[in-house]
Amino acid sequence: MKLIKTLPFFLAIIGMTHMGLAEGNDADCPDCVAPVKKAKAAKAVPHVYPTFGSIECLDPAFTKLIPATAKIEKLAEGFKWSEGPVWNKKNGVLYFSDVPNNVVFQWKEGVGTREFLMPSGYTGAAARGGEPGSNGLTLDRNGNLVLCQHGDRQVTRLNANGQWTTLARYWQFSRFNSPNDLVYKSNGDLYFTDPPYGLVGNVNDPAKEINFSGVYRLGKKGEVTLLTSELSFPNGIAFSPDEKTLYVAVSDSKDPVIMAYPVKADGKLAKGKIFFDAAPLAKMGLSGSPDGLKVDKLGNLFATGPGGVLVISTQGKHLGTINTGQPTANCGWGDDGSTLYITANHILCRVKTTTRGQGF
């Protein structure tokens, strides 16, 4: 695998310094005998993005999280299936996957979108269909990009020098299905889901080596622990702010739910329960199913599902919806933590909130 030709830009955005030009008078100008008064800099005019969709309030508590004036801003489009947005706080860059096209893109305010990494999830020589690219993305505590790679069926890390490290590929000598989404616990353990979406034949693919879809923990020493095998299609994954609960979305059209698992002292999971049932929304004909999810500092869930992004209280009450009108894959906090970036089908968009994301 190799980085695309914009690697120098990559190195710059993850912390390398850049050169600047010194200011001063032109010494060759005979009239420049006195300091020239600097012109007053023009105030930058923020770019105005087109808006679409709607924001639906179902409970007064929703207004404390998303203002009534909020809009869904369309930042970019033209992707095949956008996924896994993650924000680089240090450099103000958003990374996200286009899974079928096997690409990671980056978006930056004032710059726009450009390819960052290709291939992102499948590095084999033989052409293949399905969903081969990277899916969920996150950053480790050192700012390295960590990817769930569908096609290569592993979790990997990309460092600042463009070097790759495979973090997890097997459970008990069997290849994973296709790692989908991931989240770090504050102690450095990495939790991830492993449904079969990256396999060309899905659950019936002959290359499938594990007969279930698991939720796993990757320990700091590289050990992989199976946490649960009870879910049909585990997908998005996130911790509550106190890390006592692990939420896992289940993208099952017959049983679309979000599960909540108590986290034991040793990091393993106690018996889970249904935290939110999205079946009533799906029966209304709304597009999408439980997929990616994130948590704000108050513990509210911002979870993709039928209709767009569902805002759900800590008690599992549906407070409102960011209606994208698209099957919506995932979301992630960015900027100062109050902006929710959303990957909705072929679109990258955002909503300004009045809450703050966990981790900001």
Image: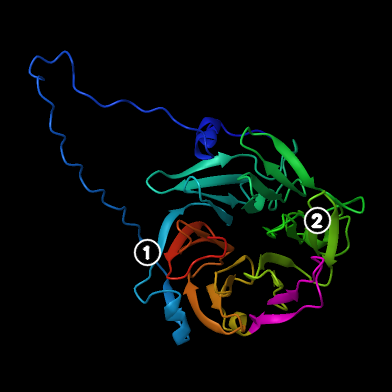
Callouts 2 and 1 close, C-beta under 8 Å: no
Residue linked to disc 1 = 51
- The answer to whether residue 261 is left or right of residue 317 is right
Give the residue furthest to the front.
34
Q: Split into 4 quadrants, where in the image is the N terminus?
A: top right
- The answer to whether residue 70 is left or right of residue 194 is left
Residue 81 at least partly seen: no
Q: 167 above or below 250?
A: above
**Residue 121, image x and y in percent?**
69, 45
Q: Report the front residue among 123 and 237.
A: 237
Residue 265 at least partly seen: yes
173 in the magenta segment? no
At horizontal 42% and vertical 70% (from top left) the residue drawn is 354
**Residue 198, image x and y in percent?**
73, 54
How far, Cα to Cα, is label 2 from label 1? 37 Å
- The secondary element bearing badge 1 is classed as strand
258 in the magenta segment? yes
Span colored in magenta: 257-279
Q: Report the front residue among 21 and 350.
A: 21
Residue linked to disc 2 = 177
Question: Which amino acid type corresponds to the residue marked 1 in the rendered image?
Answer: Thr
Q: Report the front residue among 196 and 136.
A: 136
Q: In which quarter of the image is residue 30?
A: top left
At horizontal 59% and vertical 51% (from top left) the residue drawn is 97
- The answer to whether residue 306 is left or right of residue 158 is left
- The secondary element bearing badge 2 is classed as loop
**Residue 15, image x and y in percent?**
52, 38
Q: 263 above or below 180?
A: below
- The answer to whether residue 245 is left or right of residue 283 is right
